[in-house]
Image: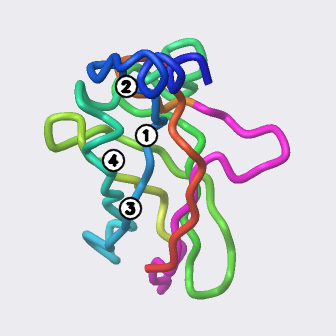
Amino acid sequence: MALAADHFAYGQNNVVYLSPRATSAAVVSHSAAQVRVHFDTNTIPGGLVWHNNVCQVDSKFCAGYELQFNNGQWVAAKGEIVENGTQVDVTASVPQGSRVTGVRYAWADWPICSLYNKEGLPALQFHFLV
């Protein structure tokens, strides 16, 4: 709220006060169980970054994502920042004969929140059917 106050009340137009917000998601590959998530570029002027203290996979891939398959099952997935920090590719192991039907991030009682903008604001949770 302090950043929003700086922007609106004090006229500091260069202050980023919004958390990264996913706007859409699309399947890149059913066979590889890969979904690309697109973000509102107004909320990530410097691009997306990982918060290294919570990345549980490694420095390039991060946890906190899930993919849903046509059997209704949600499977833990990993995210990778792509396209100059403006999008995230989410991938998981593909159950035999399955197709991806959904993607979500930070969708738990105690979620892993690994994705931030360069200003240090955490990405909002999201859930898309694809």
Q: Would you place residue 52 above or below residue 89 in this image?
A: above
Amino acid carrying label 2: it is Val
Q: The residue under label 1 is which amino acid type?
A: Pro
Q: Nearer the viewer, residue 74 or 84?
A: 84
Give the mark nearest the N terminus, 3 or 2.
Answer: 2
**Residue that badge 2 annotates:** 16
Q: Are marks 1 and 2 in contact (CB under 8 Å)?
A: no
Q: Residue at x 37, y 25 (%)?
A: 16
- What secondary structure is found at the residue carrying circle 4? strand
Identify the residue position indicated by label 1 in the image: 20
Tell which residue pokes out farthest to the right in this image: 109
Q: Give the numbered dot on residue 23.
A: 3
Check if residue 109 falls in the magenta segment: yes
Over which residues does the magenta segment extend? 95-113
Which tag, 4 or 1, sits closer to the chain's start? Answer: 1
* Residue count near mark 2 (Cα–Cα under 10 Å), binned few <14, some 14–19, many ≥20: many
Task: Quickly name the residue at label 4.
Answer: 88
Task: Categorize mark 4 by other alpha carbons within 10 Å: few (<14), some (14-19), many (20+).
Answer: many
Helix, strand or loop for disc 1 = loop
Magenta: main secondary structure equals loop
User: Residue at point 51% right, 38% down?
Assistant: 123
Query: x%, y% of residue 128?
Result: 51, 71
Front residue (pair 45, 10) = 10
Q: Inspect the image, locate mark 4, and give the three-letter code of the amino acid beneath it.
A: Val
